[in-house]
Image (cartoon, rainbow, N blue to C red):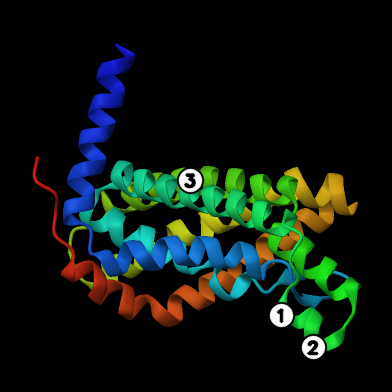
């Protein structure tokens, strides 16, 4: 029974890899890997919200997933997001091993400070708890995104930009809130000492800001979805 399940999943992934545009898959994977690296730098911090530089790209995987939901359906969109997460964890493992090597980063030779080299190792190597917390948050959020996107699509009659925008914006708002909240519950509260009010306010505010980013680029996402081809059944 388990062998049949894995065989079906393998066949589904093979079919998707043949049909998904390489550019879309590349953007999805690179955005997931890059936003975790950028998350090491603070972008904005006030008494009611904190944003890291991962915000610059955190909306992009959800826009790509919305495109894939439109063409391939929620289940296959989730499969592709899981693939991106697995690749991200593989690269995290590689970065972690590189950070443990005895060599020096180029910036060390510019400054001559061991502290700079150690800081770069900690940044590139990252915190395992934060990376896995981020992966868990996105895994849950990608499932929510697919469910909401497909559910809203069933209520729409037309297949045009307006319908794409409605299903994309609604699914992104909900899934980004879930993503931010799960990350806050798993990482920010236990590690950074946040309280539940801060977690909720940050999750809502960040979700609205990320939605604004997707709104700005939704036209490009719609054009990309039109170039995708449905996999053969």
Q: Residue at x 17, y 52 (%)?
A: 18
Q: Which residue is mark 1?
A: 106
Q: Quadrant of the N terminus?
A: top left
**Nearer the observer, disc 1 or disc 3?**
1
Identify the residue at image location x=37%, y=58%: 65
Please report the residue visible at 33 percent of the width from the left and 49 percent of the height from the top: 77
Residue 117, above or below 156: below
Q: Which numbered tag is attached to residue 110?
A: 2
Judge from the rendering whether residue 134 lies leftward or rightward of residue 8; answer left or right: right
For the residue pair 222 and 38, the one nearer the viewer reads as 38
Between disc 1 and disc 3, whose residue precedes?
3
Q: Which element type, helix, strand or loop, lies under badge 1?
A: helix
Q: Position of residue 142 (x, y in %)?
A: 46, 49
Residue at the (45%, 43%) spot, across then down: 143
Q: Residues within 10 Å of mark 1 (few under 14, many from 20)?
A: few
| Quarter location, residue 119 | bottom right
Disc 1 from disc 3: Cα separation: 29 Å
């Amino acid at each position: 029974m388990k062998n049949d399940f894995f065989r079906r999943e393998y066949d589904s992934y093979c079919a998707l890899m043949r049909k998904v545009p390489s550019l879309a898959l590349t953007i999805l994977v690179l955005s997931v890997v890059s936003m975790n690296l950028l998350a090491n730098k603070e972008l904005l911090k006030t008494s009611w919200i904190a944003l890291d530089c991962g915000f610059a790209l955190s909306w992009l995987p959800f826009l790509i997933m919305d495109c894939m939901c439109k063409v391939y359906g929620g289940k296959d969109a989730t499969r592709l997001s899981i693939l991106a997460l697995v690749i991200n964890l593989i690269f995290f493992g590689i970065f972690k091993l590189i950070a443990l090597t005895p060599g020096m980063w180029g910036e060390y030779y510019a400054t001559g400070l061991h502290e700079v080299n150690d800081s770069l190792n900690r940044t590139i190597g990252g915190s395992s708890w934060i990376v896995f917390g981020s992966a868990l948050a996105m895994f849950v959020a990608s499932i929510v995104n697919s469910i909401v996107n497909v559910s809203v699509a069933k209520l729409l009659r037309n297949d045009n930009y307006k319908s794409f925008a409605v299903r994309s914006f609604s699914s992104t708002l909900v899934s980004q809130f879930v993503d931010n909240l799960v990350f806050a519950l798993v990482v920010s509260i236990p590690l950074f000492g946040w309280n539940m009010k801060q977690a909720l306010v940050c999750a809502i505010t960040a979700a609205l800001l990320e939605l604004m980013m997707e709104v700005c680029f939704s036209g490009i996402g719609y054009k990309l979805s039109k170039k995708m081809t449905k996999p053969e059944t």
